[in-house]
């Protein structure tokens, strides 16, 4: 798996951290960020489909 580095505002990171840890939605930050990217890409694909910019496979 490839590692990347991103800059995130402190406020956004604090919000993210509220969902990461024992008994929370995500095990770690990487898991939370991957889930967010997947959801965003799915949303963008759906928007593109509705506007005829993406072929259904």
Image (cartoon, helix red, strand yellow):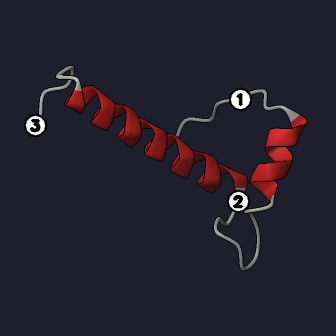
The residues bearing labels 1 and 2 have C-alpha atoms spaced at a distance of: 15 Å
Q: In terms of depth relative to the viewer, which is nearer, 56 or 33? A: 56
SS at circle 1: loop
Q: Is residue 17 above or below residue 46?
A: below
Residue under label 1: 5
Residue under label 3: 57
Please indicate whether residue 21 sits to the left or right of residue 4 in the image: right
Are the residues at dot 1 and dot 2 in contact (C-beta closer than 8 Å)? no
Q: Earlier in the sequence, mark 1 or mark 2?
A: 1
Q: Is residue 49 above or below residue 30?
A: above
Location of residue 6 in the rendering, given as x and y in whole percent from the top left corner: 72, 28
The residues bearing labels 3 and 2 have C-alpha atoms spaced at a distance of: 33 Å
Residue ID at (55%, 35%): 2
Residue ID at (80%, 51%): 15
SS at circle 2: loop
Residue under label 2: 28
The residues bearing labels 1 and 3 have C-alpha atoms spaced at a distance of: 32 Å
């Amino acid at each position: 798996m490839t590692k990347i580095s991103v800059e995130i505002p402190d406020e956004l990171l604090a919000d993210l951290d509220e969902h990461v840890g024992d008994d929370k939605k995500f095990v770690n930050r990487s898991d939370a960020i991957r889930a967010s990217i997947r959801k965003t890409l799915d949303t963008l694909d759906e928007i593109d489909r509705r506007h005829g910019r993406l072929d259904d496979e």
